[in-house]
Amino acid sequence: MLSTLTLAGVLALAPAHEFALHSGRIHLGDGSVLEDATVHVASGKIVAVGTDLDLADGIPVIECEGELSPGLIGLRDSSGAGAEAQDNTRVVMAEAELRFAFNPDHSQVHRLVENGVTSVVFAPRSGSNLIGGIAAVVKPSGRILVPRALLHIDVSASGAAKGRYPTSTAGQYQELERLFSAPEGSIEELVQGRMGVLLEAETRHEVQLALDFAMRHHLRGYLVHAKRAGDLAAAVKASGLGVALGPFLPGEDPRHLASAVALAEAGVPLGFAVDGSRPLPSALRWSAAACVRAGMKRAAALRALTGGAAELAGIADRVGMIRPGLDADLCLWSGAPTDPSSRLLAVYIDGENVYQAPVKETVEEDEE
Amino acid sequence: MPDPLANRTAMQAPKHRWSAALLLFGGVAVGAPSLSLPQDPHGETSAAASETLFLRAKRVIVRPGKVLENAQVLVEDGRIRAVGSDLTAPEGARVIEGEVVCAGFLDPWSSLGVDQAVLDDTRTDASTRTADGLDPFGTEYDREEARSAGVVAVRVQAGRLAPIGGYGAWISTAPGTDLDELLLLEDADVGAQAGLAARGTPSVFNRVASADKVCDTIRAGLDYDRAWVRYREELESWKVAIAEKEAQLEKDFKKAKKEREKAVAKAEEDGKEYKEKSYKEDKPPRMPKYDADKEAMARVANGEVPLVVECHRVAELRALLEGTRPFGRLRLIIAGGSEALEFADELAERRIPVIVFPKLDRTPLPGHVDDVGLALAGRLAEEEVPVLLGSGGTKAARDLPLLAEVAIGNGLDREEAFAALTSRAARVLDVADQLGTVERGRRADLLVLTGDPLVFNTSITHVLIDGQVVVAPKEDQ
């Protein structure tokens, strides 16, 4: 309680652009941990992190009672977009940029921050689009990190529109191959490797076909919605694609959790999605905890929430780890970040303290 | 605090009766074929003589707040025989060692083990028994998952969307398909709801009206009960009056007989029909018409069984709280209570427990001002409202301990969360004589853990249900 007060106090006084956070445990985001270490932040970027930093005089050091991690990254989200997250008037929306649907003032976007999420892949919701549009990477603070990040391609059954071409899997691939034979715009960027793919496939059969397609066109990116992809872990690994897990909910089919564990064990790059059919930011950490309960290693789960997700979204040079040069997107937890009973105490985006846990009214008694 | 179990009439004592099974054929005939079998065909649980177990742990959590260091628990015939720190293992007992031993977790708001049609039935009434919808065959897998996570019993409720859902039941997550063994309490509560609809969002008027209906139903139960009390009193005094009259007539028998004969003769002479003299005592008091639903609600009104009302929003919560104030003996429990924080003072003062479901995929309620979300359990507990945790009437009992950890991560005290999952759930819903604490005489539904319960790093090594080891590490089986 006291440390939180100190933290708030210092923040009010210190020049916001340069400070350091000292914590007993810092999770770097690649699965490794520094004990008793300090992060030096200046102008919204991480300047240095280490156990014996040489800080210039006058840089305020904030003592954090808790564990620091990079801000969490959601691999698929449409918080606040509402009906804007999907436009099914046409089957192929290859040039529709989702960043136009991003409204950082929406309450759902605030909810991301309250759950420690500092970057999301803002993507079309699944519906009856074969190609849903271009996902952006955004921060809930309102910043658009990458306007054209990943192209959403839906080869699941839900991607096949009812009553209009294509209505079948065969039709979907016929249309895709037609578009890919003379690529232009976003599809050209995709085949040239300048853009990733967010490939939506649900059943194992759909996943199999999607993997073949991705390999045929040398696509990078990740699968979403593929809840049983773990049954094909070796094939997924061979494709080079990653998988956005979840979001899982209480009562989740244990086979989905087993699938996630199998993917982790096969070394498939993993992240977590925020959005199934609607945004569920609190399900992000739940999903990680459920995977750990099912047998995933904690370090792997945390990596999937942070650095691993950043790699899949193609933003590893910007966010996802506590590493010099990256954005100062940080979360302070009362305990281990993957432990669901840990409380989120503070969130920083670009070095700015955007969330502070409400302090209980027992502070005065504590001081006595 | 008075023992709520003491209120229960002997007939409805919390133990399984075959009546539930017999009634099944006349009631909601779901899962009925199972009953035609005299015994579990696989013989998984039947008749296996239960072994004597001796648990040894660094800490035995007897009940929340009471911990014995370096203690032992002796289990015989499915019951806890002794708990102490100086017990020695009887010869031949199987010894299990662990860091911590505590009571098994209870899910007071589940649908595990009950046929879906029973849960979705919108035409249930107060006398409907959820126990009749128990389907031990279709749910064996779910129960296995639940007990692996340490959840040993769940309260299930039929007719979630019906105005009155009927009797809820506690069922064990033990293996096997023997209804008699699975059913722990067939009349744990009467369930009801205010403000829910099968389809769409009901208007505020409809929501308030549904809360009023719950209160009217309690009133009807009370009136019914009073009518019976009055009837019994009248019957008693009638019996006395009749006896007195008979005695009097007996005494004056000869005279009366003579007088009667005279009167009969006179009537004949006059050519009239003789009319027997009537006495007001001839007419017995009128018996009220038997009504099973009203009788169930009478038990509710008298506090014999608690009333669990799923209710979320301010308007219907207010109507429900106001409407139930006159019923002094009612034991009201709120399930859900999304906006219950609004009434924290009254809930705390009236000691009305709230069963919170820490729901991850909750969509914010329209027009809601102070949306506390996952912090609800913690905030209510802070205001001294008795908090329970449940899996929201889903089949996710397996995830209840993890949900409790989420509630802890959102401000609920760990000790409070543990109480919510054990002793408080047992006490509030009338199974405290069987479950919820590690005390002598209780059912041996126990957990052996590698550390304190509801801590993420802790894992459960052994689960005992009814004195049987139902979960154990592979090398220990």
Image: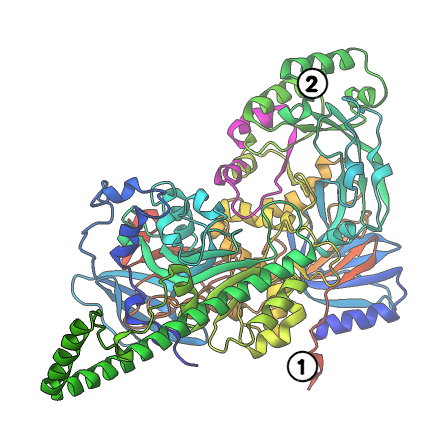
Please state, as top left, top right, bottom left or bottom right, where the C terminus of chain A lies in the image.
bottom right
Q: Residue furthest front?
A: B270
Chain of the residue on which disc 1 is drawn = A
Mark 1: which amino acid?
A: Asp
Mark 2: which amino acid?
A: Gly
Position of residue A172 in the picture relative to residue B331 (left or right):
right
**Which stretch is magenta?**
A230-259
Where residue A85 sits, quadrant-wise, is top right
Query: From what the image shows, is residue A265 above or below residue A299?
Result: above
Q: Earlier in the sequence, mark 1 or mark 2?
A: 2
Q: Residue at x 34, y 76 (%)?
A: B6
Query: From what the image shows, is residue A360 above or below residue B376?
Result: below
| Depth check, front residue: B118 or B295 | B295
Residue A87 image point, x, y percent: 79, 30
Where residue B15 sits, quadrant-wise, is bottom left
The 10 Å Cα crowd at callout 1, few under 14, some 14 to 19, many 20 or more, is: few
Residue B225 image point, x, y percent: 40, 71
Residue A366's disc is 1
Quick check: is A258 in the magenta stretch?
Answer: yes
Residue A177 image point, x, y percent: 72, 13
Residue A163's disc is 2
Residue B328's disc is none
Q: Residue at x 29, y 79 (%)?
A: B280
